[in-house]
Amino acid sequence: MKLYVYDHCPFCVRARMIIGLHTLPVGLEILLNDDEATPIGLIGSKMVPILVKPDGTAMGESLNIVRWLDEYAGKRKLDETVNPQIQAWLDKVGEYVNKLIMPRDIQLGLPEFATQSAIDYFVEKKEKNIGSFADNLKDTAKYLAQLHQDLQKLEHYVPADRVRAGDWSMEDILLFPILRNLTMVKDLQMPHKVREYVEYVARETRVPLYFDRAC
Ligand SMILES: N[C@@H](CCC(=O)N[C@@H](CS)C(=O)NCC(=O)O)C(=O)O
């Protein structure tokens, strides 16, 4: 099987997590961000992740891929329960987190941005949603102050103990990809338990973090 992704894509991380948890034989293929032909040829839209299954058919939509792979692996690992507090936290942080993340996505030397045209494609598309990357970078301190407050709240209900006990949930599939992307923000301070959670999940799912290249 093959999974088409961008490294920075949080939806793709969802699929990578379940592959790592089950150690499934799925090859990772990182597309250039401006490659429209490959995803459109596979699923009819310019969107990743895309899973190509053993029968050669292609499947889009991260949560469908996650559930399909969890089932395919034989013994399901994921509980469907999602703590409403975690969902509310994700909704709140989701309002501004891309302003910290997207301008940094293109500064990390990721394979999907190996060409200038791939970078230009991303910038043009995403600035329509979040405004100028340069302006957002200048506002880093403001968004980081808000994020630090929100992370302090998350510290109270981050499910670090549950995952340590080997119990995995859809909640982790939703939460970890966002926290993983935040590790690319240089002055980020993660409260103790949140950091423990992120590092543990990264290890168990084999999805590396960005701490070493934060900018
Ligand atoms: N609902 C989709 C969303 C996937 C998605 O938005 N992927 C982004 C990358 S993070 C994408 O491919 N966007 C097209 C683009 O950036 O041109 C899913 O869960 O798989």
Image (cartoon, rainbow, N blue to C red):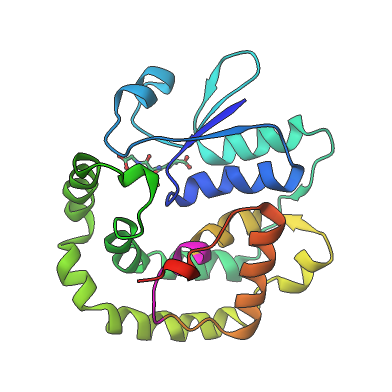
View quadrant of ligand 1: top left
Q: Quadrant of residue 42?
A: top left
Q: Quadrant of the N terminus?
A: top right
Viewer-side residue, 29 vs 19: 29
Image coordinates of residue 44 in percent, x first then y, are 37, 21
Left or right of residue 119, residue 48 in this image: right
Q: Quadrant of the C terminus?
A: bottom left
How many numbered discs, if any?
0
Left or right of residue 211, residue 114 in this image: left
Image coordinates of residue 101 in percent, x first then y, are 35, 64
Is residue 12 magenta-colored?
A: no
Q: Residue furthest top?
A: 55
Image coordinates of residue 39 in percent, x first then y, are 38, 26
Is the residue 48 above or below the residue 134 in the image? Answer: above
Is the residue 128 above or below the residue 181 in the image? Answer: above
Q: Which residues are magenta?
A: 179-187
Q: Quadrant of residue 83?
A: bottom right
- Residue at 57 percent of width and 61 percent of height: 175
- Residue at 75 percent of width and 56 percent of height: 168
Image coordinates of residue 80 in percent, x first then y, are 71, 50
- Residue at 19 percent of width and 63 percent of height: 133
Viewer-side residue, 42 vs 202: 202
- Residue at 63 percent of width and 60 percent of height: 202
Viewer-side residue, 177 vs 112: 112
